[in-house]
Image: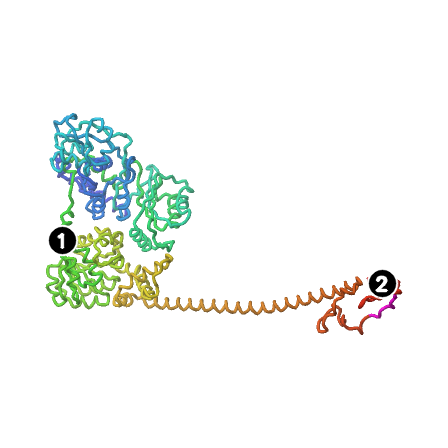
Amino acid sequence: LLFAIWLVCTSLLSTAEGATSGSSGAGTTPTSFSTPASRTTPIRVAYQGEPGAYSEKSLRELLGDNVVAVGRQNFEDCYRAVASRECDYCCLPVENSLGGSIHENYDLMLRYDLTICAEHEFRVKHCLLAKPGVKKSDIKYAISHPQALAQCDNYLRGLGIKPIPTYDTAGSAKMIRDRKGLPAGCTPENTAAIASDLAGQTYGMNCLDKGIEDDDTNFTRFLLLGRSGVAQFLNKNVPGKTSIVFTLPNTAGALYKALACFSLREIDFSKIESRPTSASLLSFLKFRSQALGKRSRTRHEIPRFRYCFYLDFLESELDERAQYALSHLREQADFCRILGSYPAKSRLVGPVKDAVDSLKHVQMKREDTLATSLPSDGEETQKLNIGIVGYGAFGQFLGQQMAGTHRVRCIDQMDRSKEADRIDVEYFPMFDMHNFLEDLDVVVFAVPLIEFEDVIRNIAANQLSGKLVVEVCPLSAHPKKILLNHLGGDVDILSTHPMFGPSDRSGSIDNDVHLKYSWDGQPMVYDMVRISDVRRADSFLSIFERARCQMVAMTAEEHDKLTADAEFVTHLTGRILDRHMLPATPVSSREYAALCDVAEMTSGDTLDMFYGLYKYNPNAKEAMAKMRENLARIERQLAGKEAYLTAKAELQNSERQKLLAETRHLLEQIAIDDASISVRKSRSSGNPSSRSPPPPSNRVANSSPGRSAASPSKREPLAPKKHVAGSRPPSGARATSPSTPGATKRQK
């Protein structure tokens, strides 16, 4: 059955193609797009610079001459053009063999979820371009990008030409052609531009000399980035390369262990580089990793200098060895992202190759392959009329950023006219809701979560008709449900949660300098609940995007599932650990400083805001019960530990007393034994003067049971004393006769 269906579809497709080709006629040119659009519609590729720039020449070397090259003013505009689907790809330089890496593009790869599809090593050849009719001897000045001038310094010195830097290589040729913006003293007749030969063709310039660079090893590596990868199209016949970026914990040997994941599997590197990354960007990377289920391996705060490591290895991410290596690396890294697996050495695969091959036989004029603007360029200057309902601290925080590029008005129950006038915001009192909502494009509700439903119900649904309604509550599922139930289908609904606020920046609301950068890298979660005017919604979201927020598309329900518990526990901890419990100290640990930050950030939140987190989070009560249980468990653990140590101390004290008593008794026994031995020695030596007095009657003097050394009745009878004439025996001495057997025995 499937085979029959395939045959029918194939037959119908071939018939349709024949009819199309027959109707087009033999003399129809390919530019009429008479064949199916999927085969002849050129792909749009964004690049940085003017037409004729080296970036354009590089993308044409890689993709051919029939792609539409769209020039943008800066690198980030190229990323935006692809992310907004106005362009299919962007071709951007990432490193130069003489100048090193272009770090801005590496940083932008982290901010935008684009994937590397191909690479191209472009040989940079500088040309000396001049207006037709101008000779080399007439040239006094050379204008170009400072890097291009530096690479041709010896050549210019040899000709006595003075280099003058400008903003762009191809732009310099354009300045000479248009006679606009030339530096002082420069005219089209005495000035040449250093640019590519393609720039000369684009602006009608003569090439006076070619290959004028001092070093002929000048190569620039370009990357082709798109919205989807090509790793699945790589095979053994096409050598692959993979680019990754990762961060590591601040531990000894962390980088060595990370590289060992690849070296132990004999995977070769082609590049490794470290790049300092902002703490705000790393906070977002950590948030996104946790949203994907990966927890950070360290609790230390982000240090002042933290590095991302960019690594290129010569394997596809789908190869078995690479998969094991990447899995091993993810176990060690705090964050790891694959920037893309792609064919090496300027090869194309997958849909990129198919699109390029389909355009090989199409003949297009040069002007048809160039574009300098996109449909969204005109919308960038379009100002929205934005109204903020609720002009408290967070409303002021949003209003100050939006007032710079849009017309902003606010309404609040309290008189906020002074705060509004300070940042050029128009204030309306609450009773003037009708005039406030008139001619608004976007209505932002920055009210507490517990008041959200009442505020929405007090506004007539027809007053919000045709407008974009935006809620910025910390929990999104409940406001989303209210908006869907109360507002009609002609009202666009955008559910957002800027995961930052006034407490995330130092200083007050008036600190414009810090506010300009305080949104950089902060996560902005949004859910396009119901959008009919996509351009208006994109224009509003571009406020956060252009402030370099990290845009995270996520449903309200998924957002609450991931962040509701964490938000509630954070604010609960901050309210428990108020600033009075955490006094300032000149010396503190990082953990104490983190607690102080939590208490400081949550100290300005109202009880209404915290109650909203409690009421509309189904797990809030369970979290509080768990916290009480944990606190009680800690108290029990501390009480048990204290009781154990007390009992242990008492036991040790009792045993110590017993040990001292036994020791004292043993010492006394030793002293008695020593005294007894001394007495015996004195008796045996016959020295009456050394005889010791008998021990007290209440002490044991002899180890023999029933015998006391001080009992005279129990002594053995003495032998008769033999006195020598004229001599007197010593006092207390016992005279024994050697001839008496008993005496000899006792003496021994």
Pointer 2 local density, CA inside 10 Å: few below 14, some 14–19, many at least 20 = few
**Prevalent SS, magenta region:** loop
Residue linked to disc 2: 744
Looking at the picture, tell me which residue is in the foreground, 611 or 682: 682
Secondary structure category for the residue under label 2: helix
Residue linked to disc 1: 383
Per the rendering, the mark at residue 138 is: none
Q: Can the viewer see residue 346 in this picture?
A: no
Residue at 34% x, 58% y: name it: 594
Looking at the picture, tell me which residue is in the foreground, 373 or 30: 373
Q: Amino acid at mark 1?
A: Lys
Looking at the picture, tell me which residue is in the foreground, 113 or 516: 516
Q: Is residue 722 magenta?
A: yes
For the record, the magenta segment spans: 716-723
Q: Taking 382 as reference, is 116 above or below it?
A: above
Looking at the picture, tell me which residue is in the foreground, 370 or 571: 571
